[in-house]
Image (tube, rainbow, N blue to C red):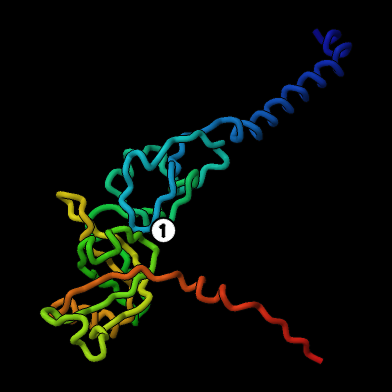
Amino acid sequence: MRTILRKHRLLIISGILGISAAAITHAAVSPYVVTSPVVVAARDIRPYESIEPGDLRIVDFPRKAVPKDHFSEAGSLQGAYALSRILPGQVVMSGHVARGKGEVGLSVDLEPDMRCVFVPAGEERAVGGLIKRGERVDIVFTPKGVTYAAIGGGQPSLIVRSLLVVEVCRRPSSGEFAGVVVLARKTEAEAIATGIETCAVSLLLAPKELLVNESVPGTEAWLP
């Protein structure tokens, strides 16, 4: 036995080193080869949107690349709400969602002087109900029972201009357009709340603010 060991010492040592290298390589590579199921967004999920089963899908990620706060089952997100925008294919993590009662909503992103206010209006007074979230509207209040021409010089009593629509509301039973939630400053929101009680309300679709500046030609100033 000793004679065999002496004769084949180099061969045995080479074999042991080869086995050790293979084991080390396997330990280093296996986390990248072995995968784990991860929940990702199947579509663009907006902030504060309720997450439905069809909004998610399961993909296999290399174990080493899986974030610690991930979800491995879509069922665990049943009834959850998105706290921030989740892009298609993005891994859904615990910080992206909230569950249970007392969910935070739009108020978490409001500045101290800003308010969200619901403005009720039927389709006939809201561009046929074609207004979408993210667009801007002018709100026109006309006193009830007073004709347009009878108001000082043909001017309506109040116009609040270029307010951002953060949500379009529809009646649950029929799906008909019911109004919009707009983002307004505190004083504007208070005026809107007062006008809703005493006036007929119309929503006018307004151009985006960016378009206002596009008609102004660019200029250059050469300084000495």
Q: Is residue 79 above or below residue 180?
A: above
Residue 109 visible? The answer is no
> Which residue is at a point 39% across and 71% down the rendered structure image?
206
Specify whether 165 is left or right of 208.
left
Q: Give the image location of residue 189, x and y in percent.
A: 26, 79
Specify whether 65 is left or right of 43.
right
Disc 1 marks which residue? Answer: 84
Q: Give the image location of residue 187, x and y in percent.
A: 28, 85
Residue with the most extreme right position? 7
Question: Hey, what amino acid is under mark 1?
Answer: Ser
Residue 178: quarter of image: bottom left
> Which residue is at a point 80% across and 17% down the rendered structure image?
12
Element under disc 1: loop
Q: Is residue 95 above or below residue 30?
A: below
Residue 170: quarter of image: bottom left
Q: Give the image location of residue 159, x and y in percent.
A: 29, 81
> Which residue is at a point 13% across and 79% down the rendered structure image?
144
- Please state which of residues 40 and 158 is positioned toward the viewer in this rendering: 158
Residue 101 visible? The answer is yes
Q: Quadrant of the N terminus?
A: top right
- Please state which of residues 19 and 137 is positioned toward the viewer in this rendering: 137
Residue with the most extreme left position? 145
Q: Quadrant of the C terminus?
A: bottom right
Specify whether 220 is left or right of 51.
right
Q: Give the image location of residue 191, x and y in percent.
A: 23, 83
Residue 134: quarter of image: bottom left
- Please state which of residues 186 and 82 is positioned toward the viewer in this rendering: 186
